[in-house]
Image (cartoon, helix red, strand yellow):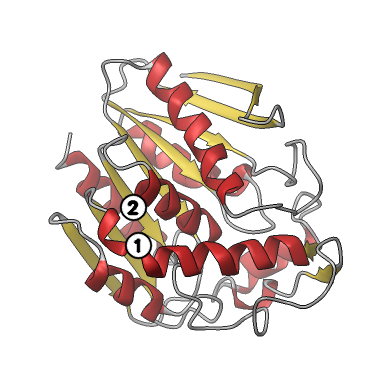
């Protein structure tokens, strides 16, 4: 196993912190995209499960998050997040020209990869979405857009809804790399990105597996059901897990969820 990290410049020069876990004989590459206010290290367990199955894993911290550069938890425009994903996918493609590439995105990361897949079809072999924000049926940040200056910051109140396991919630709340505030600029960029997704679902045509917890208090499972019904993909699957909260990769039955994602990817290599 080779583990490396590096700062990679995105489209506008903002440097993103990227970590790569490469097994001896990889059969495919998985790019993992984290959610709002968190960071790539919260996917160490998922990464271990993937590398044990001979997947190379590329992860990065979103701009303005954890170890990446950029104004903290802030976007000027909804396209910035998908362009950052595009840069990491391009890096994975350049470094692995003979391997298929898949994307796993959770929550805002699921939103990011859905934007990327809709704007740039055919770039990767498939997508796995986990609790992806694609419709905003649960207004966890209140009505959007917010009529305040974009550099106004609001407290991160996501912690209580992330998981049914109290230990995961406690670790989230005490994690120094988890951002404690969210800018109005970022929240309003989510609004504009979701509106664009709602207007262009037929442009998403790649293979996709949508996974969602039925008891997700932060992102409604109806987001995934609406997306599933409206996209142009012919190879699409959806599973709503009874009783699970938002972070399905951290729930007590996480091995079942992760195995489901791995099996779906393996069937498409």
Question: Horizontal placement of 204 versus 137: left or right?
Answer: left
Question: Horizontal placement of 217 versus 156: left or right?
Answer: left
Q: Which of 165 and 83 is in front in this view?
A: 83
**193 over 143 or under it: above or below:** above
Give the image quarter of residue 101. Answer: top left
Q: Earlier in the sequence, mark 1 or mark 2?
A: 2
Q: Is residue 171 visible?
A: no
**14 over 148 or under it: above or below:** above
Q: Residue at the location (43% across, 46% down)?
A: 116
Mark 2 sits on what residue?
A: 128
Under tag 2, what secondary structure?
strand
Residue 13, percent across and down?
Answer: 70, 27
Q: Nearer the viewer, residue 13 or 3?
A: 13
Q: Which of 5 and 81 is in front in this view?
A: 81
Packing grade of label 2 (10 A; few <14, some 14-19, many >=20) is many
Distance, label 1 to label 2, CA atoms, is 19 Å
Q: Which mark is residue 200?
A: 1
Q: Which of 76 and 136 is in front in this view?
A: 76
């Amino acid at each position: 196993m080779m583990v490396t990290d590096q700062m990679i410049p995105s489209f506008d020069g903002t440097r993103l912190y990227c970590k790569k876990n490469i097994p001896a004989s990889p059969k495919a590459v998985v790019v993992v995209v984290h959610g709002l206010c968190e960071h790539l290290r919260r996917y160490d367990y998922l990464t271990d499960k993937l590398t044990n199955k001979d997947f190379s894993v590329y992860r990065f911290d979103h701009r303005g998050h954890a170890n990446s550069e950029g104004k903290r938890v802030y976007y000027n425009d909804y396209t910035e997040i998908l362009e950052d994903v595009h840069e990491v996918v391009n890096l994975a493609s350049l470094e692995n020209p003979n391997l298929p590439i898949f994307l796993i995105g959770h929550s805002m990361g699921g939103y990011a990869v859905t934007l990327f897949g809709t704007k740039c079809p055919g770039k990767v072999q498939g997508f796995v979405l986990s609790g992806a924000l694609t419709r905003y049926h649960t207004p966890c940040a209140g009505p959007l857009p917010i009529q305040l200056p974009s550099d106004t910051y609001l407290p991160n109140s996501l912690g209580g809804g992330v998981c049914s396991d109290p230990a995961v919630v406690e670790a989230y709340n005490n994690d120094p790399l988890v951002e404690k505030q969210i800018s109005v600029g970022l929240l309003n960029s989510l609004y504009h990105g979701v509106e664009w997704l709602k207007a262009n679902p037929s442009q998403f045509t790649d293979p996709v597996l949508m996974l969602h917890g039925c008891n997700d208090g932060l992102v409604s499972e109806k987001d995934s059901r609406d997306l599933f019904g409206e996209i142009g993909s012919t190879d699409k699957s959806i599973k709503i897990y009874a009783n699970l909260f938002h972070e399905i990769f951290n729930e007590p039955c996480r091995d079942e969820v992760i195995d489901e994602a791995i099996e779906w990817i393996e069937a498409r290599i």
